Structure formats: C-alpha cells, structure tokens
Amino acid sequence: MLFNSFHFLVFFPVVTTLYFLLPHRFRWGLLLAASCYFYMAFIPKYILILFITITVDYFAGIGLEATQGRKKKWILLASILANVGMLGFFKYFNFANENIAAFANFIDWNYPIENLSIILPIGLSFHTFQSLSYTIEVYRGHQKAERHYGYLALYVLFYPQLVAGPIERPQNILHQLHEEHRFEYQRVTDGLKWMAWGMFKKVVIADRMALFVNPIYDSPTGHDGPALVFATLAFAIQIYCDFSGYSDIAFGSAQVMGIRLMKNFQHPYFAKSISEFWRRWHISLSTWFRDYVYIPLGGNRAGVRRVILNLLITFLLSGLWHGANWTFAIWGGLHGLFVALNHFIEPRWIRLRESGFAKRFSPALDALSLLSTVGLVCFAWIFFRASTLSDAFYITTHLFSGWTTFVSQFFRLTQEGIRAGFWGFVSGLFASLNSITELTRSEIALSVIALIFLLYIEIKQHRGDFLARFNLKQPAIRHVSYSLLIVIILALGTLYTGVEQAFIYFQF
Amino acid sequence: MTEKNDFLKFLKSSIAVAALIALTIAAIFIATPPDEKHLYQASLLKSELLRAVPSPRIIVVGGSNVAFGIDSELMEQELGIPVINDGLHVALGIAPLNEIKHYLRPGDIVIISLEYYNFTDEASFYGQPQYLADWVEFSPERIWYLHEPYKQMPSIFTMMLERKVNRQLNYYLYGFSYEAGRNFYSGDLFNEHGDFIGHLGENSNKQFEIADSVYPINLIEDAYVFLEDFNQFALSNGATVFYEAQAHRQTNCERTGKKHLDRFFNRLKTKTTIPLLTNLDQLCLPDDYFYDTPYHLNAAGRRIRTERLIDSLKIALGLE
C-alpha cells in the first residue's frame, strides 16, 4: 500500500481509531494484522518471507540469550545467514548471475545458468536490516530477547516503517510497542502535521520534479548540458523530498499511535561537508552501516590505509544495498572516496577556518563548503538515477556541452520579452526553458513556488523547533494553515498527469 | 487533561479544518468553470442528442477516429435514419458506451468503432482517469458511467481539482488565453450531429507530419466480455449493435502487421456475437486520406469511410 493512495487514506484512520478503542492487551494484534494487510497489498505471498526470517530471529534471540561462547557465535551466524541469504537470493542472484554470464561470454565459456524470473519483495533490504539489528543487539547484550513472538513480528512488520524505514534498533522500538499509549491531543496532532508535511514533499514537489527528471534520464542521449544539469539538480530535490517525505509520513503515523521513530533526515543539503551530509541523510542506514560494518572493520582506529579501505568497503556495500546494479556500486564508491578525502581534508580546513584571516570571510567560506558539498552529492546522484552505466557516463561527459547556445538564447529571448513588458519577459523566460523541458508553464511556475516554500520551511526547521513555535500561534491561524496545506496537497499534486508515482525507496 | 477531553478537542479541531478544506475546495470549483471551448464541451451536445433524438436512430461511438471520420449528414440522407456521432476521444475508453446504455431505446442501432489503443490495457479500455476527470467535469453525474464509480470517485474529483487549478494557472501564464494548449481541437467545431468539422473547409489544406506508429493490440480479455455484455443489454432492449473497424492508415497497418489485425478481428468474432461491418479487405485506407494523426481522416477519407459504412449498413439492415 502506498502512503500517497486513497487506500491508505481509508486504512490509516480505521486502524488508528481501532487502536485507541481497543484495550492495550489487544493492540499488538491489531497493529500486526494491519501491518500484514499493508504489506500484502503489494504481493501477498511475500509475507511468508518475512515470517520465515522473524521465526528464525525469534528462536535465535532466545538462543543467543541462553548461550555463551562459540555456540552463541554460531547462532548469530545462522541468523545472519538466514536474513542475508534471503536478501542475496531475491536481490542479488540475478545480478551476480548476469555478471558471471558476461564474464563467461568474455572467456568463451558456455555458462548454463539462466536468470530467475523473480520479483524483488518490496522493502526487502529495509526489513532485513531491521531484523539483523535485532539479533546483533541481542548478541551484544544491548537488548533482551523478545519472548513474545507477536511483538517481535510487529517490530519487523510495523507498517509505518516496514517498506522504506527508518531502519530501527530494537532498543528504541520494542519497549515502545509494549507500552500503553493514551490519546494525547498534542502528540496526535503533531503526528498528523508531520504526515501532511511529508505528503506535501512527496506529491507536490517530488512527483512534480519527476515530470522534469524522467523524460531526460529515461533517454539522456538526446539532451545537452543544460537539460542534464537541471535534471540532475531536480533529481537531487526529488529524491530528498520523496524519501524524507516518506520518512515524515512514517514518523508522523507512528507518532499518532505513540511510537516515536528515529528521525531519518536532518536537512542534508545544508551540510558543509560530505561527512556531515551522511550524518544528515538517511541517518538510520548510515548509523546501521557505521555500527555493524564500519566500526567492526576497525573504523577510524586503524592506520590511514585501513581507514580508507574501511570507508570504501562500507560505502560500496551501502551502494549495493540500494540496488543490484553497478550504477549503485559506483554511487557508493564515489561517496566512499569523497568521505575518505574529507576525512583528511576536514581537520586542515577547520584549522584554516580558525585563522584570523579566514574568519573575516566566514560566511563566504560556509557558502563555498555548502555548494561544493551539494555539487559532489549531485554528481554522485547521476550514477544513482541513471538506468545504465553507459547513460551515466554519457551524462557525466556531456554536463558542459550546449551551454553557450542555451545562455545566448536565454538572454536573447528574455531581452526581447522585456521590451514587450512584464508578460513579454515571462514569455521569454518560459520560451528559453522550452529548450530543456516540455513542461507547461504552470508546471514550471508551480515547481518554483513550491521550492521557495520548501526552502523557507527547511530554513525555519534548521534554525530551531519550527513545529513547537508554530503550535503557539492562534488556533484560527493554525487551522487555516493546515487546511491550506491539505488543499495544496490535493490541488497541486500531480495525479492529474495520470502518472502514479511510487516512493523511490520502495524498490530497495 | 483527560483522554476524553483530548479527544473532544481533537474532534473539534478536525471538524474546523475539514470545514475549511471543504469551503476552499468548493470556492475553487465554483470559481473555475470548465473551459467553454474545451474539446469535451462537445460531449454535452452528444449527451443532448442521445436524450432528444427520437428512435430509431443510429449512434456511432468510439474515439476521435469516429469524431473526425464519420459524415453523419451523408449517412442520414442515404439511410433515412437520424444519426448521432458519439465519438470524442480515445482516452475516454468505454465510458461513453456506458452513457449510451442509459439512453438506449428499442430500434436503436449502435455502431462501435473503438481504437485498437483501447484494447492495450485496462486503463485504456475503461478510460484514463485524467481524461475522464475532464469529461465528468462537464456533467458530474457521469461519474456513474465510470467502470468502478465508488472506487474512482475520490481520485477523479481530486484530479478534477488539480486540472482546474493547472488550467487556470496556464490561462494566466499564457497571456490570459487557453488557445495555446487547444490548437484546433475546439469544442465549438462540431456540427449538429456531433461530427467534428474543424478539419474540413479551409483547415483541410493544412499539412501535418504523421507518425508511422504501430497500433498497439494487446487483446485484454475483459474487453470482449464487456462488449458482449453491452451487446446482450442492447438486444434485450430491442436495439442492435455492430462493430466497425477504426480508420486505419496504410503505413500504420503495415507497421502493425496484418497478422495482428486479423488476430484482433478473429478474436472479436469468436468472443462476441457482435456483427462486424467492415470488409476486412478494405481495412486500411491510403495515407493521403489522413489529416493530423493516424486516426483522424481528412475530408476525402471521411467521405470514403462513410460511403463504405453506408453500403455495409444497407446490407446488414436489409435496406437494399
């Protein structure tokens, strides 16, 4: 079930109302049944995969708590193999097979194994990692084994974060699922506000950006630098609004029921270094890799070469976690490289910033840091979004082509327009954009207005607790604001184009 | 504050917000009427014809291949039966057929001429929601002619709201005019029978480059079930149903492949009991007979197609 569907519009209030009407002892059952229904709206039979891993992890958790030494390690290994094995089979079998077949073809070996015709279970990477975190934390002694099968199943299946995270830790969630949560006006309404804001980011901004991005990225070879650059910038906005929008809806819908999920995003495009970007982007995944891969590999404690290697391994795995395609591996590899470079540059940069001379140019240097970070992130997004490696290479090698024509046309058309007055200027502006997009004027205008609004709210949120301050305003102002936000979501979405957009991260 | 008080406070706020939303949306709907020259404006004329023209009458229904490609006046003269051209746009799918059901009377003759495109998938057959939203905007009770009215209602009305807002914004941004997006597809260019005539007369000299596209034919099973149900409904009401092939452009026929076209008509013959009017040897018309798309006939093509249809009908109805 998609959050941005009418199906969910009925599902959510029904489940939430029943949740508060039922006595506490029955609520886990309701949430588990609702979560199963939510998941089964995609491909029903795949729910069995989840229950297989939950059952393995249930017994593994109890076993881990009851044993010590070598046997304990074997139990952990069995649980990891069961989870990763499922992920490997569904997500990576065909990828590995294709690469072996290509290599076999290269050395003239008649490779006999065909690809399997399987569909990737939705959100498999997310719930696999969430399951893994349970057994690892029990193994480490940070979490007691869950004796109630239903609660463990709910920990993995809890519908707000089932298909696209945040990837939770048992220490944060399991005890909350056990606790009784009463109906609290402020908590419930704050949750609904998060949901509305997430929906705005998804249907008004992300889906609108997709209208611009998809035609260009689906066939990049027909486009020059300006279109490729604008499409890449639009994708950077699209993926942020799509994924953080999803996370806000997940956060809000869980909060309504009294469950506080971790925040997955903290305004990542305000980061002034790549390392800071990763502390703000998809926080639940980056901390997962930090805690369960990077630190066990040795983290920052080893020598320079080993730190670089650890970073590259971690980010390559993170890239492949997203998708079984070399484009994702390169995306991860690039970030690994950027973070490794940053690891060595940042201390020197900070020392430079603290010198008397540089302090005078602090705002300019901040802007430079921010822009260079965004630039590197956007460059890497090319590999994330491109369908194939050849598309990605075409885009990266054509980013600077065609600018002279675009700029001269832009100035010519806008200058001609200015002579005809304000509307002439507007027409000239839109006409110059026609060389990079076929979107209507309303699409372009709405995109610009929505982005300005997003930036305004992001800055407000970045500077402090925007929601808490907004809650202090007069009820009439608040009610009108909520109504307008909902009308904007309904009226300025992109349903009317006939293209229903699933969340990007559902595919992972 | 107790849980009960919290809940009552929440209820009051929710009612206030819901009322404000309803008021705002109502204001948008009232302040943004349909575009008076929108192509679908003609659907009101067609509905009125279905309601008012006395039976027996001939109703030709399909997408724009019917709107552009049938000369109802000529048919009426030759057959002596009133003719309604109920063709409008391929994206409406079979929604106009459901509307016809509502007005069908004994003695009526329905000629269905859907585009192959309608048979590619369910959305193309039952109608594409964004276009249905425009169609319903002109006459809200049409929501009941959709495939699954209750299920589609929320999305159709949301799309309608979005399309109204976008249309209005484009109106301002294109210099206070709808003309830029309309081209010659204007709702006031239909004659009193419902034929589109904007491509005749002076406009007929315009030259367009037409894509040599393949006609997509996917043969969805539901389509034949629906058509046969429609046929049985018509028969039980004393009406007769025929099927007429869409206007085919020779180049597009060739690109699609005769094999696929034959397969489509064989399937239609075996899965339904609807008689086919088209002579399969004359399935494809020369490229010169087409106007701006592989579906839209020009004046000469329209005349040839109508004459052939008249001949077939005379035989089928025993008028010769």
Image (cartoon, coloured by chain):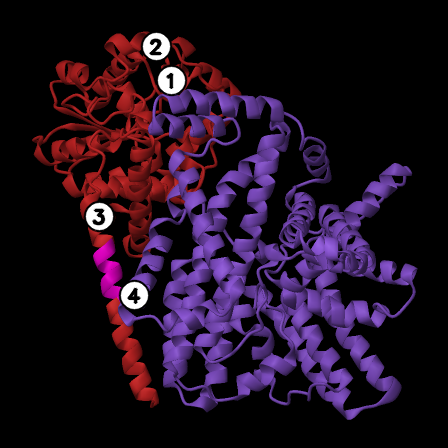
Main secondary structure found in the magenta portion:
helix
**Nearest the eye: A208 or A174:** A208
Magenta segment includes B21:
yes
Are the residues under badges 2 and 1 in a single subunit? yes
Disc 2 to disc 1, how far (Cα)?
A: 9 Å
Apparent colour of chain B: red
Query: Residue A499 falls in which quadrant of the image?
Result: top left
Which residue is labeled 3 in the image? B29
- Element type at marker 2? loop
Q: Amino acid at mark 2?
A: Lys
Screen quadrant of the C terminus of chain A: bottom right
- Residue B236 showing in the rendered view: yes
Which residue is labeled 1 in the image? B292
Apparent colour of chain A: purple
Q: Find out whether the residues at labels 2 and 4 contact each other: C-beta distance under 8 Å.
A: no
Mark number, residue B153: none
**Nearest the eye: A282 or A116:** A282
Left/right placement of residue A176 relative to residue B273 reads right
Q: Find out whether the residues at labels 2 and 1 contact each other: C-beta distance under 8 Å.
A: yes
Which residue is labeled 4 in the image? A477
Residue A375 at x, y percent in the picture: 66, 45
A188 shown above or below B283: below
Q: Mark 3 vs mark 2: which is more N-terminal? A: 3
Disc 3 to disc 2, how far (Cα)?
A: 38 Å
Q: Nearer the viewer, mark 2 or mark 1?
A: 2
Which residue is labeled 2 in the image? B206
Disc 3 to disc 1, how far (Cα)?
A: 34 Å
Q: Find out whether the residues at labels 3 and 1 contact each other: C-beta distance under 8 Å.
A: no
* Disc 4 packing (10 Å; few <14; some 14–19; many ≥20): few
Query: Residue A81 falls in which quadrant of the image?
Result: bottom right
Residue found at x 79% / y 68%: A293
